[in-house]
Amino acid sequence: MSQVALPGANKSYGNHPTPSLKPRNGRVLIPLMATIGLGTCSGFGAYNYYVAAKSRRELSLLEEQERLARNQQLMDAYGDKNSLNDVQHALDTYNVQ
């Protein structure tokens, strides 16, 4: 006898080919690794900026203290000039410099 061809009879019920997980992992892992890499780089950049800003701030505070000390020295040297004695003291100090 001959075999009877029925619709759907050729389907195998055993092992179906499963889609590979590699392309899916690649699509996920590459952007993930790029994000981690950029996060790390921006973390270093932010830290370096913070350290530089802190250093600039400390330097400007030191310069401000030196400026205030110099201004106080000048005020002590030249005085208010409200009296003749203050003017004389200011002239003596100016002539010494």
Image (spheres, rainbow, N blue to C red):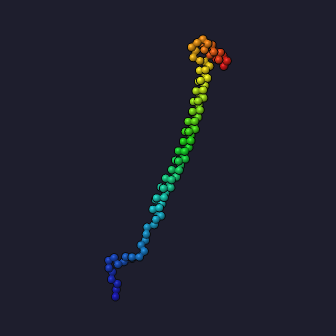
Rendering coords of residue 60 (x, y %): 57, 33
The residue at the point 58 percent across, 34 percent down is 59
Rendering coords of residue 2 (x, y %): 34, 86
The residue at the point 56 percent across, 43 percent down is 48
Vertical relation: 37 (above or below) 84: below
Rendering coords of residue 3 (x, y %): 34, 84
Nearer to the camera, 61 or 17: 61
Which quadrant: the N terminus?
bottom left
Vertical relation: 54 (above or below) 40: above
The residue at the point 46 percent across, 65 percent down is 21
Vertical relation: 19 (above or below) 49: below
Vertical relation: 36 (above or below) 16: above
Say which quarter of the image contains residue 83: top right
Which quadrant: the C terminus?
top right
The residue at the point 39 percent across, 76 percent down is 13
Say which quarter of the image contains residue 7: bottom left
Rendering coords of residue 95 (x, y %): 66, 16
Nearer to the camera, 17 or 74: 74
